Image (cartoon, grey):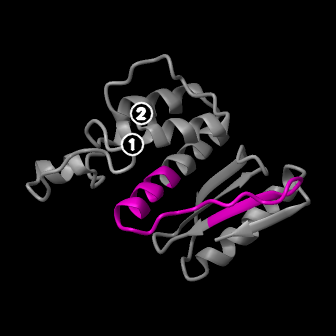
Amino acid sequence: MNTLPTKTRLAERSLLVEVGCGLCGGKVETPLHLSTQSEWAKLVWEKAYFPFPREKHFLNFLHLFDSIYSSLCWDLVELWCVIVRWIWGSRNAVLHGRLVKWKAPVEGLYKLNVDGSWSREMGAIISDWNGAVVGGFGKKMDVCTSAEALAVLDGLIFAKEIGIQDLCFRK
């Protein structure tokens, strides 16, 4: 679990000196800070209307994950993982100069954002025109050659399952 290349982890390995958060510039960049305590993460969780145990103090990211895993249904655990992965991707985009700008669909439409990877994983998040997360999923695949296409297909199936018909999407 201590393999995520946060700034604190890189500093521990003498690969980096600066340990400030890549998203908010404050504190030290740990997995727990990035996923829940940074200003960016707080905004994401607020917009997601996620049943997050905010009042509880977590010792580290693993303690947080154990709490999420033991207190929520599997669908919400999956959604939580997708959102945390998205926060990590946003951090990397900011840190490496590829700022991610989410653009809301027109009022009345929903937006499907998908991602597939060579590690045989894919996921999707559906948001409304206000940026509120409606749902999402993440899952493993047998083959990774068509990860993006399968993510779009499964995202469209998921949107239909939860009753959304007016949809635009972005990779």
> Does 112 lie within the magenta span?
yes
> Where residue 139 sits in the image (x, y, percent)?
59, 58
Q: Nearer the viewer, residue 61 or 94?
A: 94
> How many dots with numbers?
2
Q: Residues within 10 Å of mark 2 (few under 14, many from 20)?
A: some
Identify the mark at residue 49; answer none if there is no mark: none
| Identity of the residue drawn at 45% across and 37% down | 39
Q: Nearer the viewer, residue 55 or 26?
A: 26
**SS state under label 2:** helix
| Identity of the residue drawn at 35% across and 67% down | 96
Q: Amino acid at mark 2?
A: Gln
| Identity of the residue drawn at 57% across and 72% down | 142
Q: Are marks 2 and 1 in contact (CB under 8 Å)?
A: yes
Residue 154, by quadrant, is bottom right
> Where residue 25 sits in the image (x, y, percent)?
32, 44
In the image, taking residue 121 as reference, residue 34 lies left or right, namely: left
Identify the mark at residue 34; answer none if there is no mark: 1
**SS state under label 1:** helix
Looking at the image, is 11 positioned above or below residue 113? above
> Where residue 138 sits in the image (x, y, percent)?
60, 55
Quarter of the rendering occupied by the C terminus? bottom right
Quarter of the rendering occupied by the N terminus? top left
> Where residue 167 sits in the image (x, y, percent)?
84, 62
Query: For the view shown, which residue lies furthest in the top direction?
Result: 55
Q: Amino acid at mark 1?
A: Leu
**Mark 2 to mark 1 CA distance (whole Å):** 6 Å
Q: Find disc 2 in the rendering and name its residue.
A: 37
What range is drawn magenta here? 86-114
